Image (spheres, rainbow, N blue to C red):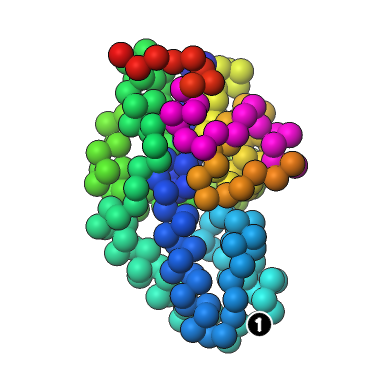
Amino acid sequence: MKVALFDLDGTLIDSERYYFSIWQELMVREGYCLEKDFYQSVVGSPTSILKEMFQEHFGEIPMFDQLFEEFMARREQAQAQAVFPITKGCFEYLTYLTKRGIICGIVTSSYQKEAESILENLKLARFFSFGVYGDQVTKGKPDSEIYLKAIEVAQQPVDQIVVYEDSPNGIRSAVAAGLSCVHIKNFVDPTPAIEQLVESSCSDFFEVMSLQKIRLE
C-alpha cells in the first residue's frame, strides 16, 4: 500500500450517529418515524439528493425544505464546535501511516470548506496530503467519480491504494473505481452484500492495525 484514502463522516469521526439523532428529532416533530435501517441506506449520499431519497421512502413531506434547512444549520454548528468523537485508533493509525511515508487522502461527500474545518478543529488535517470533496464532483457516492478523481490525484496504481469507508454508498463508489476497501463499522452495520465487496470489516482502526499486525511504538 502506497496510498490510503479515508472517508470522513462515520469513518474518521463518529458523526453519522449525531446526524441521525438530529434527523430523528426533526422527523418525529412532523409525525414520522425515522428508522435506523433507512437512514443507514442514505449515509454517504450527497446532501443535495437527500430530499429525493427521503420522499421516495416516506412519500411527500410538506415541511421537508424547512426541516433540511434546520438540519444543515445544526450540522454546521456541530462542525464548528467539533463535537464529534474521533474513531478509536484513528490518530494512532494515521501516525503510523505517516511515519512510513504512506500518502493519506480524504475522499468525502462533504463540501471542502466544512470538511477542512472539521479536520483542523480535530487536529487531523496535518496527516492528509490531499482531499477530494463533494463540491468537486458532479455525481456523488455511490457513483465512482469521486474515487476516480482521487486516483488521478494520488498518481499511483489502483493495487497500491486502499480505501477506508463506513457506508454502503461509499464502499460501492470505491469498488466501482477498482479499489480495495476496508469497512469501518462505526454507525452502519455490514450486510452480506457489503461484506462481499470489502477486504474486511473492522469496528475501529485499532482492529485495522490488529489485522495488519501493526505494533505501536
Q: 140 or 101: nearer the eye?
A: 101
Residue 187 spot, x, y in % from top left: 52, 50
Q: Say which element carries label 1.
A: loop
Tell me, yes or no, if residue 155 can be seen here.
no
Compared with 11, 180 (above or below) is above
Quarter of the view holding residue 133: top left
Q: Which residue is depicted at the point 75% across and 42% down?
A: 193
Q: Is residue 195 magenta?
A: yes
Q: 80 or 36: nearer the eye?
A: 36
Tell me, yes or no, if residue 104 can be seen here.
yes
Q: Which residue is mark 1?
A: 60
Residue 69 spot, x, y in % from top left: 42, 75
Q: Which residue is depicted at the point 35% across and 17% down?
A: 216
Left or right, residue 17 beside residue 62: left
Compared with 69, 21 (above or below) is above
Segment colored magenta = 193-209
Q: Is residue 188 magenta?
A: no
- Say what amino acid the circle numbered 1 marks: Glu
Left or right, residue 67 beside residue 145: left
- Quadrant of the drawing holding the C terminus: top left
Left or right, residue 56 beside residue 63: right
Compared with 201, 79 (above or below) is below
Left or right, residue 78 beside residue 53: left
